[in-house]
Amino acid sequence: MSRVKPTVNFIHAWQHPEEIADEVEAELRFHVQMRTRANIAEGMSPNEAQLAAKQSFGDFDQIKVSCCEIKQGFPFDLKPLRMGLYIAIACLAGGVALVAINLPHHSPFSVLWQLVAIAVLMRSFLAGRRKQ
Amino acid sequence: MGKAKAGLLQGTLDMLILKALFLGPLHGYGIGQRIAQISGDELKIEEGSLYPGLYRLERRGWVESEWDVSENNQRAKFYKLTRAGRKQLIIEEQNWERLASATMKALRAN
């Protein structure tokens, strides 16, 4: 269940990027305002307090960009998905290659097919080893 | 001698954010304040770096957020820990304790 809300947020972030950017900006501005107030309460002048708040916050624009990027990032770990996809493609390619190898080889065309099949099988095997 | 401020180890910020939220929902500024408070002002985090951390935790489903009204009647985004976040905090605390005790053991070895 904990993946439902992040997925909904992810879809929303892709559908309404400007809305997300505005929300992030409002949130970060709230932080700077709160820090400014605290600085004023500690005895700084309003200008000093705002400057100090901005400095202690860091690079506002860069942080905003980072937050928007994270919001639009895929909410799942893609590594297992990529690995599963790779295994599925390798199995499919291997199956096709095995069928091709078992074809009767009476013509140059079928011999070419077999060579392609052997190449595909070897490629799958080598790529699989590299991944490991 | 002045009190030295400890720098944060990589990955520690997430655990501190989870810990701060374990005590109740807070907005981003409040989280920074609470981390400073519960660490006895020993840990000062760069304020802006809190937000990418919070957004990452939300993407993982460990915290969730909603807009509400703050203590000074301003619109603010409040974060709270999810059930998955509570479980993760327990795991992070156990990992941290193991790491800290192993490091201490290594440092005290003759």
Image: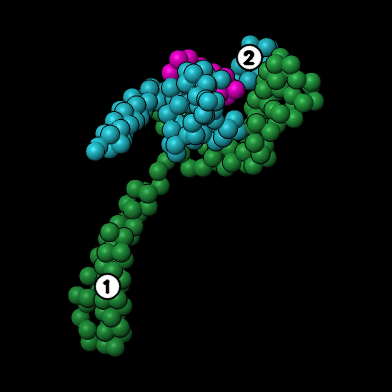
Chain colours: A green, B cyan
B49 in relation to B28, above or below: below
Picture quadrant of residue A90: bottom left
Q: What element carries label 1?
A: helix
User: Could you confirm whether marks 1 and 2 are on the same chain?
Assistant: no
Q: Which chain carries label 2?
A: B
Amino acid type of disc 2?
Ser
Label drawn at residue B70: 2
Q: Main SS of the magenta segment? A: helix
Q: In the drawing, does residue A69 fall left or right of residue A48?
A: left
Q: Is residue A83 magenta?
A: no
Q: Where is residue A17 in the image (x, y as percent from the top left)?
A: 63, 39
Q: In the drawing, does residue A67 fall left or right of residue B81?
A: right
The residue carrying mark 1 is A122
**Residue A14 at least partly seen:** no
Q: Does the magenta stretch include residue B28?
A: yes
Amino acid type of disc 1?
Met
Q: What element carries label 2?
A: loop
Question: Which of these two is toward me, B77 or B94?
Answer: B94
Q: Give the range drawn in magenta.
A: B20-32
Q: Mark 1 lies on which chain?
A: A
